[in-house]
Image (tube, rainbow, N blue to C red):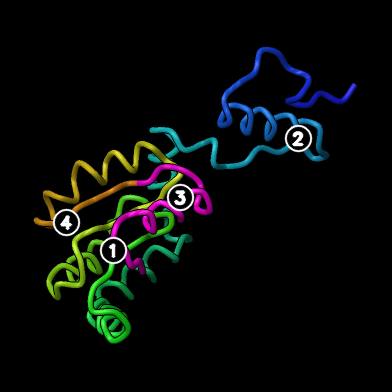
Amino acid sequence: MRITTATLNPPVSRVRQAFLRDVLEGLQSNPKKLSSKYFYDANGDALFQQIMHCPEYYLTRCEMEILETQSTAIVSAIRALAPQADLVELGAGDASKSVHLLREWMRTGMGERYFPIDISSNIIRHLQETLPEQIPGLEVQGLNGEYMDMLAVPGKHPAARAW
């Protein structure tokens, strides 16, 4: 018998229904699988931070170098297209890299609103608590969820122009 979310009672919320669908599909597939988005709790976040600091995981170091050395050029290029904008970041993580871009963004008066999007509610909570202390005047409006669902949110704000 193939189990689907439609065969279950009582009705569940949209989020729980999506989780249930993903689990059922994953368990019925060969090989078995489960999306990594379900691993991002406090332990999963800490584990990913450890992975990012492994010598084999060079992406973090490359991204850090780019944002440390090129934030001025990046902001200038965007400023040529729009004198002010909100900054939206997909998969913000702990913002240890993007803080360089955010500081330049604020320094040049590009805007004050930052919309970090991340699957981890722990990370979003962390950013909302710590970034305003690190970058005075920055308004952090964290968005917890999947990218495509969350991308519509910044555009709903009045006079929003997002990069």
Q: Residue furthest front?
A: 158
Q: Secondary structure at mark 2?
A: helix
Q: Secondary structure at mark 3?
A: helix
Q: CA distance from mark 1 to mark 2?
A: 41 Å
Q: Secondary structure at mark 1?
A: loop
**The quarter of the displayed image where residue 11 is located:** top right
- In this rendering, the answer to whether 141 lies above or below 106 is above
The tag earlier along the polypeptide, 4 or 1, is: 4
Residue position for label 3: 150
The tag earlier along the polypeptide, 3 or 4, is: 4
Q: CA distance from mark 3 to mark 4?
A: 20 Å
Residue 149 pos. (x, y %): 51, 48
The amino acid sitting under disc 1 is: Ala
Q: Residue furthest top?
A: 10
Residue at the (54%, 36%) spot, across then down: 38
Q: CA distance from mark 3 to mark 2?
A: 24 Å
Residue position for label 2: 25
Residue position for label 1: 159
Q: Residues within 10 Å of mark 2 (few under 14, many from 20)?
A: some
What is the span of residues highlighted in magenta in the rendered image?
A: 143-163
